[in-house]
Image (cartoon, coloured by chain):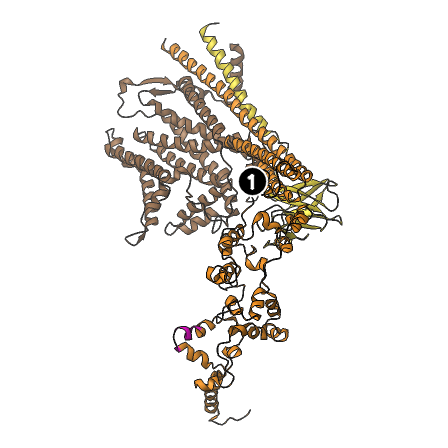
Chain colours: A brown, B yellow, C orange
Amino acid sequence: MKKWSQNLAGYFEQRLKLSGLASFARKKTVPEHGYSFWYFFGGICLFLFILQVVTGIFLLLYYKPSAEGAHESILFIMSHVKFGWLIRSVHSWSANLLMGIIFIHMFSTFFLKAYRKPRELTWVSGFFLLVLFMAFGFSGYLLPWNELSYFATKVGTDIVGSLPLIGKALKTFVLGGQEVSPATLSRFFWFHIAALPALTVLILGLHIWLVQVLGMSVPGRVKPETVREMPFFPNFLLKDALGWILVLVLVGVLCVFFPWETGAKADPLASAPVGIKPEWYFTFMFTTLKLIPPHIFFISGEVLGIMAFLMGGLFWLLVPYLDRKANRGKSSPVFTGIGVVVLLYIMVMTAVTYLLPRL
Amino acid sequence: MNRRSFVNVLLGGTLLGAAASLLYPVIRYLLPPRQAEATANEVTAAKTGELAPNTAKIFKFGSSPAILVNTAQGELRAFAATCTHLSCTVFYEASTESLFCPCHNGRFDLAGHVLGGPPPAPLETYEVAVVGQDIVVSKRA
Amino acid sequence: MIRLKRWTGSALLAFSLACLPLGLLAQKNTCLECHNELEDSLQAPAKGFAQDIHQKYGLTCTACHGGDAKQEDMDLAKGRTFRGVPARKNIPELCGGCHGNAASMRAFNPSLRVDQLELYGTSRHGQLLKKGDTKVAVCTDCHGVHGILPSNVPKSLTFPWNIPETCGRCHADRATMKAYSIPADQLAEYKKSVHARALFEKKDLTAPTCNDCHGNHGATPPQVASIAYVCRQCHSATAELFSRSPHRPAFDQAELHECEACHGKHKILPATDEMLGTGPGSVCLQCHEAGSKPYKVASGMRAALDEFLRRRDLAETLLDTAERQGVEVSEAKFKLKEAETALIMLRNLTHSLSLEEVKAKAAEGEKDLAQVTASGEAALKEGKSRRVGLVITTGFLFLLAIALFFKIRQIQKKQLL
């Protein structure tokens, strides 16, 4: 038995020269301590992303990316293709779960200050991944071409259009025209299956490379004596796999008991449904903009709100370079406090969207 | 069997079972479904020879009813079958060679125009093409 | 080139200015000028006339009242031809002088009918007026007098949804109607009807209003024998069934008012299934005794209808349950809509009083329902198999997770050694 596997390994080593990688993997360790539970969330993000790519590729087999065919093809997948309902519901549910896990991953790395030197680029690439996945969610939401997605896209791109200076041009680029139209569907489809995946592969590749090469960050408050090192292979990987299997079970249960609905076909001539809003992970921004008074000191409230979010995003991106105390190894309660405020704000604003829909 | 190999067997067995139960739906999904892809703009309403002259058939077009008429002269015509008055479904009246709505007496000719009764607008007409054995109805461009 | 004298331009200008008053004189209407300065009831005609359709055709006060509209002085304006306010009994002839004359109407609007005066003469209003009763409706009571609008303009007194109120001004007034021994509840009854709902709420202008059943100018209550023909204008399928059923000769003999006997005349409500059969609310029991043949037919038809409805509800419940479980049933729901059409036709068919025909139609519809039910049951099965599939897969995955857990523990133990 042993000789057979050794022969096979030798065959591939001669042709793929992976022994360096293999020895790196064998020697690699992952720190284990009170907070190491949070390490798994990055891997779950990766698992859900892979699930998205796989189910997305399957959906591509039957989906028709045109205004005449999109909605009907979804209906066809849900009712006539064997297990089409499952593939499509997995894709929709995983998308939402992924956004949630991304937030958990982002906040856990923030509070545990994993962005400290030398992991600044990991944080920066992570920020861009957040933006890319939100773009994935926004573009994918339009593809079924139903009432909700049509108007949610309209509302979302209207906000883009109100940016000062570049707003109109950016909105026209995003929409492929002046308003949401069949051209927008083609464009969003292109974003969703070509442009965004290409960018994501590059940045995700960098992100994972950095994580592998730099290893896991140990939070400052953990005493070094209490840290045990567990081998990456097979221990950490098997634990990772365990987590992935449980997530898969969750997705399955959600899909069977709450399959994704197809909705009514988009009718551009109809008026927007009451209470139209974007996907839940955008609602904290959406509700903020709704609550801002129309004018603050002669500046449009909406523009002020958008600029505030852009500034906030810039701040968030540059946290590794701004949090000097953490870089010096000291505790930085100010930044922890900022993180708590941001997290609470997002949670409260999201909740308000659904608890007070008539705002 | 000792503890160690039991765990390995359990692992291998459940891995196989899980893989099979995940692979089964994927393979069924990839195999083409029996019913051809239905588009919003085109549907096979009937087979040639299915309708005798001066008869008609209701079929589903998108999510609304449509009617395929084989006129007394043997010509195939297709219309939206939802009456433009209060949305009852019209039917073909062979004796008058017109489309009649039983609800309030609306009547349409075989070009979809309103001949009488309350309907305010004509019936939408569709293109009919015979492709082999199939009568294919599609929306006008 | 003609050599023009230097004063030519100014002469032309002076001439044009002199002509201006002549132009104004051509449009001069002293009646309106004077009456617009007055108040209340003397001003109202002038104000109203601005919207009047006759004004748009170039007709003025003098066309109906006589006089000379160019004279400033009141006596000269009246002159010898001034007729003053026309007497009520003369109004139809006054309006009919133009509106009943094909030659004069052709000059203004060739598409207008010219038989209104003739029809009016045949109506109850016209006949009573001939006998000297001036309290009945004349042209101006329905069309207005100084602000007459064409009937296809929403503000017109004779626009479809204004007609009930226009007729109701007299016919809903108890004091006025008492003199003629006519009830005054028709408007109130009509307002509760399904026709009124269609007209006022759904804004369906094809819905019947007073004139559609009673006629316009020749308004008369429909004769007993002709009520079915009146309703037939829209409900022809039903009327035809009624006409060839045993009810037709029976009703005529009993001098029953056809459709009205079961459906009412002004307060026509949507027909319910309770009206059919032998239960409370049944109209059949008005005439037919228990145990008689018609009684059995009524009971049989109701039973067929009830059975159809029972199957329809069953199919609908199946589809709803499957849909709640997440199974796509839109095609089956479409087929169910076809069954709804069959239901409409089935209810209609009861007017034929033929139990065989009703049963045949029900059987046809039930074929469609059977298909829907089959789809519904298949959908439920699909829903169940999804749950079964989930249990199996989840089972394997949980077992795999447990195996992994043990494996990890095993590896960890080995590493400690």
Per the image, is A127 magenta?
A: no
> Can residue B61 be seen?
no
Vertical arrangement, residue C80 with respect to residue C266, above or below: below
Tell me which corner region of the image, top left, top right, bottom left or bottom right, holds residue A284.
top left
Residue plotted at (59% across, 49% down): C261
Residue plotted at (60% across, 68% down): C121
Main secondary structure found in the magenta portion: helix
> The residue tagged with tag 1: helix, strand or loop?
helix
**Amino acid at the residue labelled 1:** Glu
Front residue (pair A309, B103): B103
**Residue B64: image location, x then y, percent:** 59, 43
Residue plotted at (48% across, 44% down): A150
**Magenta residues, start to end:** C37-44
On screen, residue A306 versus residue C86, left or right, reads: left
Front residue (pair B106, A9): B106
Residue at the disc numbered 1: C274
Front residue (pair C369, C132): C132
**Residue B11: image location, x then y, percent:** 48, 14
On screen, residue C343 versus residue C23, left or right, reads: right
Q: Chain of mark 1?
A: C
Q: Quadrant of the C terminus of chain A?
A: top left
Residue located farthest toward the top when viewing the structure as drawn: B1
Vertical arrangement, residue C356 with respect to residue C209, above or below: above
Front residue (pair A18, A243): A243
Per the image, is C38 magenta?
A: yes
